[in-house]
Image (tube, grey):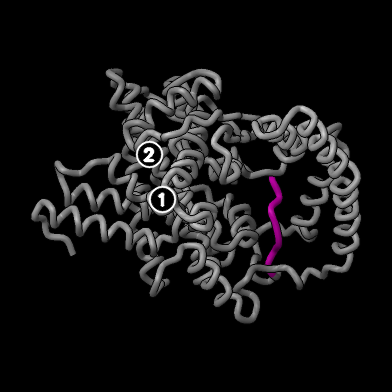
Amino acid sequence: MPLRKVHTKECEEVADLFENVKEHFIFEKDSSLISGFELISQPHTIDEMRNYLKDIIDADEYYLEDILHTKIDGLSFLNDDQKTSYKEQVTTAITNSFMPAVTELYNGLEAYKGKLAEENEGYWTTYESGKEMYMLELQDLLGLENFDTTKYIKELDNAFSKANSLVIGSQQSIVSKFNISTYAELEEVVAQYKIFDGTPEEMMVYLKEFAKTIVPELQSDPEIIIKNMDSASAKVSNAVAYYMKSALDNKSAEYITLNPLKLGDSNDVLGTLAHEGYPGHLYAYVYSKEQGLSNLSTIMTSTAHGEGWATYVELKLYEYAKANSTDENFKLIMDYLYANHISSFLLETRIDAGIHIEGWSIEDVAKFLEKRGYNAEAAQDIYRLLIEMPSGYAAYGYGKLFFNNLHTEAKNILGAIYDEVEFNAMLLSNGWTSLGELQKTYDEYMKAKCHQYGIAFE
């Protein structure tokens, strides 16, 4: 089997472009528009949701109860009797209110599915004003003024082309070095070179040391509690992990939940914890709480800013690992992981724009994949995914591109006076703002910095 390009697992992994994806994601377009591809006539989103709810109903216990009990135990202002009382109330609420509601929703979805005609399914651009709705959603997600779709698509095309070339070059270096000929062999070689091998808790210690090289140290040192997702959620979730924000006045504990069914090798786990924890989402949120921002600025979240930062963090992790090793083979693997991460999410973001702005069919997606050396058989699965969550991938693909571009431009302009820690402190100084507001913050910083050193900045 010839080598196929690799699409790296990420924190919100949804599809492997090089294997047959078995998961069913969502609605179909009218059959006349997708000839030549297998059709699935059932409304899969409803089926999958009912399967998820059934797992919750059948489970011996619901994971949220344990999380809430742990949070209550961590509240220093409650005495033991109060903690016991609140935990009993949580258990009663889940048993008597939450679980009956889950059962009612489970039964109601079955009745609703029976009334849903196939022509009611589809993606936004098949409906009147659907494209306009998508554009509003995309602009709101990114928070960019004077948004130009032509420029947006061109920027994605250029970025994906460069990233894809980087992946190919890095892959060829490994193929030549290790004399491998299949994708399976490539994965086996890459898995042998671990950045750090240990428990998630031990990895967090490593990541805190790494974080010192790119962000200021936090004033506080909250306990980071790492849990596994319950089995019902893990089976249906596309998330490899997620970070749950703490209360505004809580400085003692932060929570990260891992999906044990989606985690890969130790490098995947480490990258996931960097993304969700240090110095990704968890760090950024705690840092914002320490800046004395208004409560509204602290809790308001721009997904594009949050994911742009967290994906940039993963890139820096590979750079850090490479810089701290003398093993040339290890460095080669780090270059490869870096290249894969640069390209990841850009593909889905570009196809998302193709479907919802340019009206691509499944056949158009297949042609796009095939032209760039990817497995065209993945087109239908990617298509189903992207019509279910219009614009969702832009937060990751374009958010990462936006952050990477700011860093690249600043380094080119400032040269030797560029300070990574200072620069990132500026990017996180106002919380998770829109990309438009982030651009303004960046411009103000660069004008002041360049003026200080007599450097031109436009």
> In terms of image quadrants, where is residue 125?
bottom right
Q: Is residue 406 visible?
A: yes
Pick the residue in front: 85 or 421: 85
Alpha-carbon neighbours of circle 2 within 10 Å: few (<14), some, or many (≥20)? many
Where 190 sits versus 401, above or below?
A: above
Which residue matches tag 1? Answer: 400
Where is residue 323 shown, x and y percent of the image?
28, 26
Q: What is the span of residues highlighted in magenta in the rendered image? A: 23-29
Pick the residue in front: 209 or 294: 294
Q: CA distance from mark 1 to mark 2?
A: 10 Å
Q: Amino acid at mark 1?
A: Lys
> Would you say residue 377 sits in the magenta stretch?
no
Most common secondary structure along the magenta stretch: loop
> In terms of image quadrants, where is residue 339?
top left
Pick the residue in front: 215 or 9: 215
Where is residue 157 shown, x and y percent of the image?
38, 60
> Looking at the image, is mark 1 or mark 2 earlier in the sequence?
2
User: Which residue: 49% across, 65% down?
Assistant: 353
Labelled disc at residue 17? none
> In terms of image quadrants, where is residue 149?
bottom left
Where 186 sits versus 344, above or below?
A: above
User: Which residue: 71% across, 43% down?
Assistant: 236
Where is residue 362 shown, x and y percent of the image?
59, 62
Which residue matches tag 2? Answer: 315
